[in-house]
Image (cartoon, helix red, strand yellow):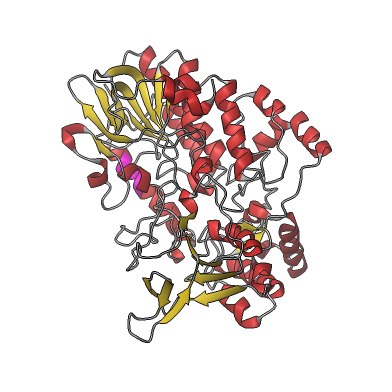
Amino acid sequence: MSVSSASSNQSSNSSTARTVDAVIVGAGFAGLYMLHRLREQGLTAQIFEAGSGAGGTWFWNRYPGARVDVESMQYSYQFSEELQQEWQWSERYAPQAELLEYLNHVVERFGLAPDIQFNTRVESAVFDDSSKTWQVSTDQGDQVNAKYCIMATGCLSKANKPDIAGMDSFNGPTYHTGEWPHEEVDFSGMRVGIIGTGSSAIQAIPEIARQAEHLTVFQRTPNFSVPARNKPLDPEEVKNVKQNYGALREAGQQQFGAFDADSNTKAAAEMSPEEIKAELNKRWQMGGLNFFGVFVDFLVTQETNDIVADFVREKIAERVNDPETAALLAPNTVFGCKRICADTDYFETYNRDNVTLVDISKTAISAITPEGLKVGDGSSEDKAYAFDALVFATGFDAMTGSLNKIDIRGCDGQTLKEKWAAGPLTYLGLCSAGFPNLFTISGPGSPSVFTNMVTSIEQHVEYIGDIIAYMTDNKLATIEASNEAETQWVAHVNEVASYTLLNSCNSWYLGANIPGKKRVFMPYAGGFPPYVAKCNEVAAKGYEGFTLT
């Protein structure tokens, strides 16, 4: 059965509630593996997916240039050795289309399609205390009862659409990088405006510039980016990796980001100026997120961070011909306090005659107009720009946005959105007190976006599977975080972040890109190995910190 046809073989307007062991929301990397894991344990599960196909972030993010920023050979499942050996990646950093093809292959290979219902958005999930089950409702009329409700909704899945006057007035087509059309978009001969210079923009801008008659980039905050050094994979290199995959995976799991960055174990202060320069140049040539391995203290010591930031700023100046443009593109923030981007010819794109950079850090966009947009204070003096198409590369409501779209109600009718109004409250990023048998994969309070997401996802899926097996073996009805454990974990997450430089800028790690959102540091910044050690310790003590009934 093809993935696209799976939902057509299922009733999406059931008048009678069905019962399964688990409902899973989302059919990306997390949801697909969760389904496979539960089926391997002999349980019944149902995935609901809003999109028309599997893929999660790689289903929605189809903008030009979209590709992964962790090397393909590591940004992939490791639960199946056969899958690892049979799949062939073509590039060092897989493009969106290839990642989507990979995930569709996983669906086919493991026979997951019959338990996935596409084009279906979960509207509510309500815990019924009398039956100890979750009652899940969808926009297609489905009513499903499940002992477990598992949110595999992703960290970056709710597009952030800016609140600008006249948003619906533009006469031409508009696009958001997080909700790109499935059909190809051709910008040939067009005057294009793009708002934003974050991760998706840094990938999209070079590609759009190659097509458009003229591209105008509106930048509020510049971002650090290093060369991806993407290239076709050498068959001999692939062969060597596959012969030693276990060692590569083990090395990755022992490093902060859950991927092998050949991390330097020294602080900059332990190295001579010559050694420091050599290490920086080595990282620059390695490319991509291998820069995370530059110095062990670059995210905790300001002096070390300044060395790295100055080095990258100098490289930006070398890549951009016009000094004024180069200065605008060079961030004055801490290197790494926002996600480090990996690019292909991003800065060089500003050397093109058909690309213009507009700084809106001091004078904002005042309105979208039928012809384009205006920059200024809303007066008659505003500067007008005319476009044939507009692109919003304005990011996501990270970590909590996709969960807040669903009416999730736990004990006594409390909503998760209400409970998290002042910031997300979880234990290990997995569970929240007052919401029995509700799990979030890569939720706030877990390493998630600081890591190779696929490895973090697998760890969470396997941990949830183990919890469910423990509950089955011990004839337990519910599990939830205790209030005390949750409070202590949230305090620990904040304490760890406070030891770093990560709180020093307005990043989506803190939700600072969303107007009105409480500024709270959401991911766990302690690194993958200590997080896994904590999870294992909790399990060894009979799931200490959880309340089981």
Residue 310's x, y, as percent? 63, 72
Q: Nearer the viewer, residue 161 or 132?
A: 161
Main SS of residues in magenta = helix
Image vertical order of residue 485 relative to residue 332, above or below: above
Task: Look at the image and tell me whether residue 425 can be seen.
Answer: no
Instruction: Give coordinates of residue 451: x percent, y percent.
Output: 55, 45
Residue 188 visible at all: yes
Of the pair 211 and 296, the residue shown nearer to us: 211
Percent x, y of residue 295: 65, 58
Position of residue 520 relative to residue 434, above or below, is below
What residue appears at the point 63 percent right and 66 percent down from the top-left corner? Answer: 308
Q: Is residue 487 magenta?
A: yes
Query: Is residue 278 part of the magenta span, yes or no?
Result: no
Residue 283 vertical placement versus 331 (above, below): above
Q: Which quarter of the image is occupied by the C terminus? A: top left
Find the magenta span and give its range: 486-490
Query: Quick one: which residue is furthest to the bottom in this view?
Result: 381
Q: How many marks?
A: 0
Tell me: 118 left or right of 13: right
Viewer-nearest residue: 472 or 531:
472
Front residue of 16/460: it is 16
**265 with respect to 446 (left or right):** right
Q: Is residue 504 left or right of residue 88?
A: left
- Rendering coords of residue 27 (x, y %): 46, 32
Query: Looking at the rendering, in which quadrant would you find the N terminus?
Result: top right
